[in-house]
Image (cartoon, rainbow, N blue to C red):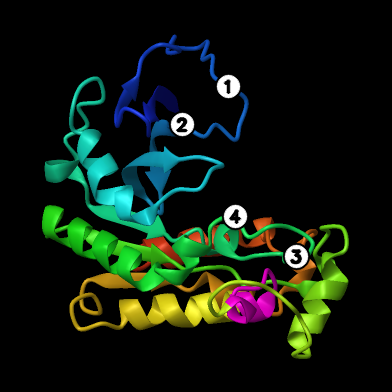
Amino acid sequence: MTELPDFSLTTMKANMSSYSPGNMTRPAPPDQTQFFVWHANGTLGGHQVTLLFVGGGIFVDIELAPKVLRMMDSAPYNLDLEKKATMVMVGSGGLHHLHLQPTKEWENPDKWQHLETRLHSSLAGLQTWLPKATMMYFTIHSMCDDLLVEEGWAAAADKYNSGKGKCEGVRCDEATFNRKGAMHWYSREMSVLRNKGHADRWGVVDAFKMTDGQCWATGDGRHFNPLLPQFTMAAMSQSMPLRVL
């Protein structure tokens, strides 16, 4: 794997100030100004593949995906994705947009409230730019309420589940950081994916269904690391014929 220069969200171009191959220097994550850019070659299911990851441990606006990926075709990256990309996978980062009120302030209510518009814009932009590539969408995970570790939140989440929770914001009772909130987000993103303009272009890695009830696979109620191979196979099986050994 090769770590390429970070991509700055402030300047919307490569950040060369901290780039030194093999000796990257950058602010400790989460870095609010830039994406990591990783490039790797290898074999998967008997096929030679090249993978590109653009992202990081920060809020990533999904509507920026078409613009940011286009920049990967410019210097210093010069990856020629417009001609070479065979599959694109995006996700909405839904868990980061749910709230923990009243134990914690809701950081991005606008992102939650305008999900449909933001998601449609991103999907449409990618479809136009890469008309021949396989498009894959990674949905929100489910959650295991009993395993959520944030102090004071388990009791608050239980109140929301019984209709007794209190929060501030438009439709805030649908945006809680628990399985109920994840289910609402999942329903909304799937409604966009079923839209006539997207349904015939986008495959789905249905992470909600794959993780729902699988609490054995998470220690914190929302990360399901043992299921990562299943996510990968779900994506690749829709984009290439895998060899059965």
Q: In 3D space, how far apart are the residues under numbered discs 2 and 4 (Cα atoms)?
A: 17 Å
In-front residue for pair 156/4: 156
Query: Is residue 40 shown above or below 149?
Result: above
Give the image location of residue 240, x and y in percent.
30, 61
Could you say where residue 123 lies in the image, as x and y percent from the top left?
26, 64
User: In terms of image quadrants, where is residue 41?
Assistant: top left
- Callout 2: few (<14), some (14-19), or many (20+) C-alpha neighbours within 10 Å? some
Residue 245 visible from this viewpoint: no
- Residue type at the position of mark 2: Thr
- Circle 3 sits in a helix, a strand or a loop, which is it? loop
Residue on which disc 1 sits: 27
Residue type for callout 1: Pro
Mark 2: which secondary structure?
Answer: loop
Q: Amino acid at mark 3?
A: Gly
Image quadrant holding the N terminus, namely top left
Write down the quadrant of residue 177 in the picture.
bottom right
Sooner in the amino-acid sequence: mark 1 or mark 4: 1
Mark toward the start of the polypeptide (2 vs 1): 1
Assess whether mark 3 and mark 4 are in contact (beta carbons under 8 angstroms): no
- Asked whether 157 or 227 is in front, the reply is 157
Q: Nearer the viewer, mark 3 or mark 2?
A: 2
The alpha-carbon separation of the residues under discs 1 and 4 comes to: 21 Å
**Tag 4: residue type?**
Glu
Q: Nearer the viewer, mark 1 or mark 4?
A: 4
Q: Secondary structure at mark 1?
A: loop
Question: Where does label 2 land, which residue?
Answer: 33
Contact check, label 1 and label 4, Cβ < 8 Å:
no
Any mark on residue 221, and which?
A: 3
- Residue carrying label 4: 107
Q: Closer to the camera, 20 or 133?
A: 20
The residue stretch that appears in magenta: 172-181
Instruction: Please state if 72 lies on the left or on the right of 167 as rendered.
Output: left
